[in-house]
Amino acid sequence: MKQYAVIFDMDGVIADTNPTHSEAFRQFFDSRNIPHSEEEFAKHMYGKHNSYIMNYFFHQDLDPEEVTALAEEKEALFRKLYAPIAKPIDGLLPFVDALRGAGMKTAIATSAPKANLDLVLDCFDLHARMDSLLSSEDVTRYKPDPDIYLKTADRLGVSPEDCVVFEDSYSGVSAAINAEMKVVGVLTSHTKEELPPCQYYIQDYRNMDIAVVLDLLGTNHKR
């Protein structure tokens, strides 16, 4: 029997964490009197790696060690803010369980640091529900580069063309397309028009079922 896989980004896909990331960045930048706007967050924060975010908002090429220290401070603030309000996107857990019950591989591939991934895994009891877990520490080339998705497919033993990716950001959708995988756009952070073309779109997982996934794996047409 042919093996298929469904790969999830985390922020905006497993959980609607982006409002909390925005608040953490607001507090972080305000403490340093660094200007920022919601428009900039949408273009230069969602789906981006911290190295890009820090260099953009600080308007300079920071030393890697400085980027690491700044990112750790901001992510610690995010985890402090998010832990008390953690909640998966509606319908996610039943959908994941249905995928696994049908024999599909499941995975998370996120640009977030491992500490954030661990928080979400613990809050939603996802450890046993995933066959592969990759975070920013596991790759050196970040989305829109396809590295994290290709590495996930390799770890799962599944061909890229037999994978469906759930993504919410421009860079994330681009990474999945660059990996030659099917893509479902999760419209938590952006509209359809703000994302590269996806094969399917959802607001949450309440109406998502295996039949849609199998249809995507069997065809390349847009829905």
Image (cartoon, rainbow, N blue to C red):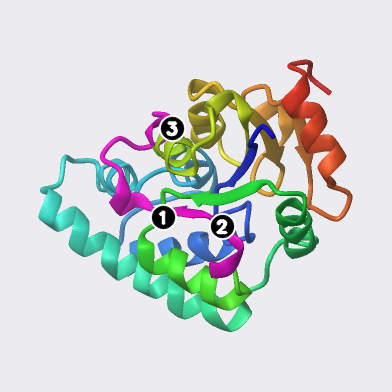
Question: With 215 as the anchor, is 178 left or right in this view?
Answer: left
Q: Quick one: 89 or 146, which is closer to the camera?
A: 146
Q: Which mark is residue 150?
A: 3
Question: With 27 as the anchor, is 104 left or right in this view?
Answer: right
Amino acid at pointer 1: Ala
Q: Quick one: 95 or 46, which is closer to the camera?
A: 95
The tag earlier along the polypeptide, 3 or 2, is: 2
Question: With 104 as the anchor, is 131 left or right in this view?
Answer: left
Amino acid at pointer 2: Asn
Between the C-alphas of marks 3 and 2, the distance is 25 Å
Look at discs 3 and 1 and give the one toward the viewer.
3
Between the C-alphas of marks 2 and 1, the distance is 12 Å
Q: Is residue 91 magenta?
A: no
Residue plotted at (78% across, 15% down): 221
Q: Quick one: 43 or 158, which is closer to the camera?
A: 158
> What residue span does the magenta drawing correspond to?
127-147
Asked if 22 appears above or below 82 in the picture, the reply is: above
Residue plotted at (55% across, 51% down): 107
Look at discs 2 and 1 and give the one toward the viewer.
1
Q: Which mark is residue 112?
A: 1
Asked if 38 appears above or below 199 in the picture, the reply is: below
Q: Which residue is mark 2?
A: 18
Question: With 12 as the anchor, is 94 left or right in this view?
Answer: right
Residue 187 spot, x, y in % from top left? 72, 43
